[in-house]
Amino acid sequence: MTNTTRRETDLLGPRDLPAEALWGIHTLRAVENFPISGRRVHRGLIRAFGAVKWAAARANHRLDPWPPEVFAAIEQACAEMLAGQLDEHIIVDAFQGGAGTSTNMNVNEVLANRALQLLGKPPGSYKAVSPHDDLNRHQSTNDTYPTALRVAAIWGVRAMEQAVVELVEAFQRQERRCAEVVKIGRTQLQDAVLITLGREFGAYAEAFARDRWRLYKCEERLRVVNLGGTAVGTGLGAPREYIFRVVEELKEITGLGLSRAENLLEATQNTDALVEVSGIIRTAAANLLKTANDLRLLSSGPIAGLGEIRLPPRQAGSSLMPGKVNPVVAEAAAQAAIAAIGYDQIVVHALSGSNLELPQFLPLAAEHLLGAMDLLTSACSLFARACVDGIEPNADRCRRHVENSTAAATALVETLGYETAQQLARDAQAAGRSVRDLAIERGLLSAEQFDQLVSPQRVMRLGSVRIGNDAKHRDIGS
């Protein structure tokens, strides 16, 4: 040991580590044992740990007070972690054995050594503030880690909900803007019936609105925590007064509507609520993926494809093909959605692989549950701002598609009858002419009547207005 190192000892023996490091021997061994992913523990989880440790310190101080200056230093250290000021000192790999013990001990060591700094003592002076006896007092990894994960997940869900709201509002603006643009609706990628571009955008808005509601409701699944249950939910080693108090302290610190599980053993053993939340995140990803791909298809071409909308150009699309502009924001959003769907599978496998009283793969689930929220939060916000808000309808292209497609004939069925409309569509296709021109030429409809039948109001009216038993010709312009 030199003046640049300090020596700490654990169950396996002594080790030297940098003198000024805020982490300690348990962190050092974890770094050596798990050089797996190169990913640090999720920042939201670190900050949530700051809140959990702060709550535990408050509850413990009420029962068995530390000297005032020691408690003040511990509180400040926890507050700094909650504020994200100690992130760089949590250095263990996100993928780790031990059900998160390495993360918990890294947190304990950093908080203890930061408190020692605040007291004017060198790191490692654990007789004054101990990672075990002070920062982990009446706690276990098995109640602090799951509780921190749920707090971090609530924060993540709230951030994602706001990003989804951005997307809903962006599509609603486009719904109003494009309300009068009639276009071809397609099924199986084939021309079907007429709709409006505005209603198409409105349908996307409604799907994302459901996602927003699901996210809002799923917070309820995350509010019940097992803090106070210690190792397996029996509260072994923790005073009853502490168990009853600690979640109340966490509620006050975080401002979240948390509650202690009635059955702490069950809450420690089972993680189905996290699987459910992951499924809700996956559902939002599925909607994002479908919508991003639809916008890519609707903007395809722009000359030789559908070209019914124009996405905002963001960058040159090719190093070889001049003039090419790709739908890069929609592609990026789609890729984030695909990743989030994959992350859900990891969460499901990690948590369903739990054994008996402990979800031993919780660190893997935490990394991908929180990571999926991050991906979709960023992707939804980007998609709204850099893509959906800038969409321009190609009304001329939509109109030409309507006039030239056999789909227009469907709008004529109530007036002309199915057989006449079918023959008109067949003849127009064979002759390479528009349904509109051929219908007018044959005297089946006037130009004004045809335009009324394919107007936005007529296309999007719910059902039809029938007069008597024979609806032919009587519904035009009604």
Image (tube, rainbow, N blue to C red):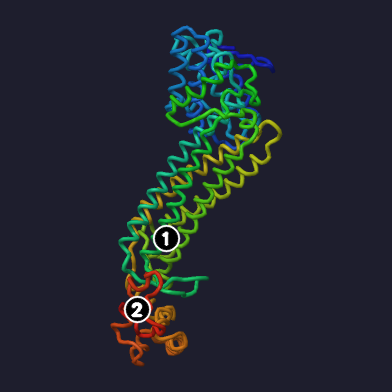
Horizontal and vertical percent for residue 22?
51, 19
Could you tell me which secondary element the residue under label 2 belongs to? helix
The disc at residue 276 is: none
Q: Quadrant location of residue 161?
A: top left
On residue 453, the disc is 2
> Going by the image, does 34 lie left or right of 321?
right
* Quarter placement of the C terminus: bottom left
Which residue is painted at 51% across and 34% down in the image?
223
For the N terminus, give its image quadrant.
top right
Residue displayed at 46% across by 85% down? 418
Q: Residue at x 46, y 75 (%)?
A: 191
Question: Given the image, on which type of amino acid does mark 2 rest?
Answer: Leu
Compare marks 1 and 2 and give the one earlier in the sequence: 1
**Residue 427 can be seen in this image:** yes
Task: Say what amino acid the circle numbered 1 marks.
Answer: Ala
Depth check, front residue: 170 or 89: 170
> For the view shown, which residue lies furthest in the left direction?
448
Q: Which residue, given by chain and number where applicable, does mark 1 sit on?
A: 203
